[in-house]
Image: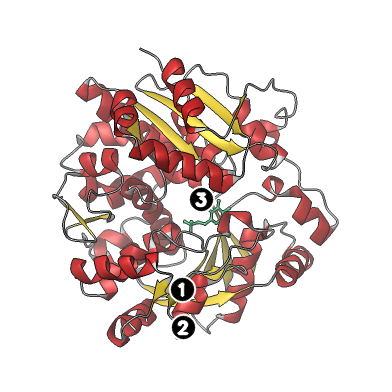
Amino acid sequence: MKYISTRGQAPELTFEEAMLTGLARDGGLYLPAEIPVMSQDEIAALAGLSYEEIAFRVMWPYVSGSFAEDEFKAIIARAYEGFGHDARAPLKQLNENHFLLELFHGPTLAFKDFAMQLIGQLFQVALKRRGDRVTIVGATSGDTGSAAIEAFRGLDAVDVFILFPHGRVSEVQRRQMTTPADSNVHALAVDGDFDDCQAALKDMFNDFEFRDGVKLAGVNSINFARVLAQIVYYFSAAVSLGAPHRKVSFTVPTGNFGDIFAGYLAKRMGLPIDRLVVATNQNDILHRCLSGEGYFKGETIPSISPSMDIQVSSNFERALYYAYNEDGGAIAQLMDELKQGGFNISQGAMEALRENFDSGRVSEEETLATIKSTLVHSAELVCPHTAVGIKVAEEHRAANVPIITLATAHPAKFPAAVEKASGEHPPLPSRMSDLYERPERVTRIANDLGALEDHIKRHIAE
Ligand SMILES: *Cc1c(COP(=O)(O)O)cnc(C)c1O
């Protein structure tokens, strides 16, 4: 399989190259040159298989030129062995036609573990084969950083440095980043806010001497390998509700559009998905866009579902690429207009988007009320992101088509909002109940590019 850029000007790469590169050189995002299709028989045959076996069958056509079959199977096995649930992504019923897909049984209790754990193992195998090593630097407002640390800890081909804003992440999130004892893990508490961390990261990538010197690599949500890993649970969930003989719909709490775009690829691969419903909080650029108002940036307003507080959705570019009939020139032009604040979407592209996607927006009050009502009516304590999804799903429920809401994080990751809404304190799963006793290891550092680069250079393994 070859990979091409959404902006049409970067060289075609193999899966391994696209994964190690991340962003394309023309500023675009990598996509497979052709989307592989599974027959109805092949989909039906997934019923009853383990999550790992489904993962292998769904992802194999995307990676087959870059890994051997046994090697890829072993990578998948290692990626998911640390999960706290044998089903990996179990389904729970909320009411007559509405199901929750629990994606929070990984090591950091959020769905990002599905992709990060896989990418960690993929990087390690690919780099070992090349006799190479890289330095991964990430900026985080909470969830991505801990998922990256858990994915790369103890791997000897990688050092991982995570920048987070000092004093501005939750205690659970901070401890998940500061308690891993592995020598290749480096948590940096920056004196600044999340935007400062992101700006510092961008400056490091633009400092070519530093970038080449430490072999900088990124694993943010535009990396195609992350999208790929997320396709799998759409298949496992739909098949357990009767696909391919029965259609299902999905509602996805959305920020950067990575998770729901994986659902779009699952549909293009042949999975009979009826609707893909985007659920946003008050940061609603995607809902406004899908409602026909164009794609225009607003102010980011902090919410109780902070992992969705995003005003520019990086992976939306991939959906636009298909909506514009794979016209890279048109996408490059739109992304230029975005720098000026936004763009309108052509009528044809709008129709293409509406063929697959619906959307809804949920206020803070509605989020709290949904946490409470889900506990009362279905005996489930859910995180605020999941509550946003549940609320929108209830508005889009159709007769005869089951709807599955993606539960993106464990309620214990956001205890303040959950307790405020429900009066109940969500406990951590017992396998990590000692999180508050583990010693922390963190370097507090000035919001200064020179200081950060110097620290990284001095702490990477030789
Ligand atoms: C990252 C995240 C999201 C948003 O996912 P995208 O792929 O960016 O759309 C939703 N919920 C939680 C808990 C997250 O960590």
Q: Nearer the viewer, mark 3 or mark 2?
A: 2
User: CB under 8 Å between callouts 3 and 1?
Assistant: no
Quadrant, the C terminus: top left
Cα separation between marks 1 and 2? 8 Å
Residue plotted at (28% across, 85% down) = 348
Cα separation between marks 3 and 2? 35 Å
Residue plotted at (64% across, 39% down) = 173
| Furthest-bottom residue in this view | 347
Q: Residue 358 placed where, x, y %? A: 47, 78
Q: Residue 56 placed where, x, y %? A: 30, 45
User: What residue does disc 3 label?
Assistant: 89
Residue 107 visible in this rendered orientation of the protein: no
User: What residue does disc 2 label?
Assistant: 293
> Is 415 situated above or below 336?
above
Q: Please tell me how crowded label 3 is: few (under 14), some (14-19), or many (20+) other residues with Cα within 10 Å.
A: many
Out of 239 and 27, give the one closest to the viewer.
Answer: 27
Q: Residue 170 placed where, x, y %? A: 70, 42
Specify whether 167 is left or right of 399: right
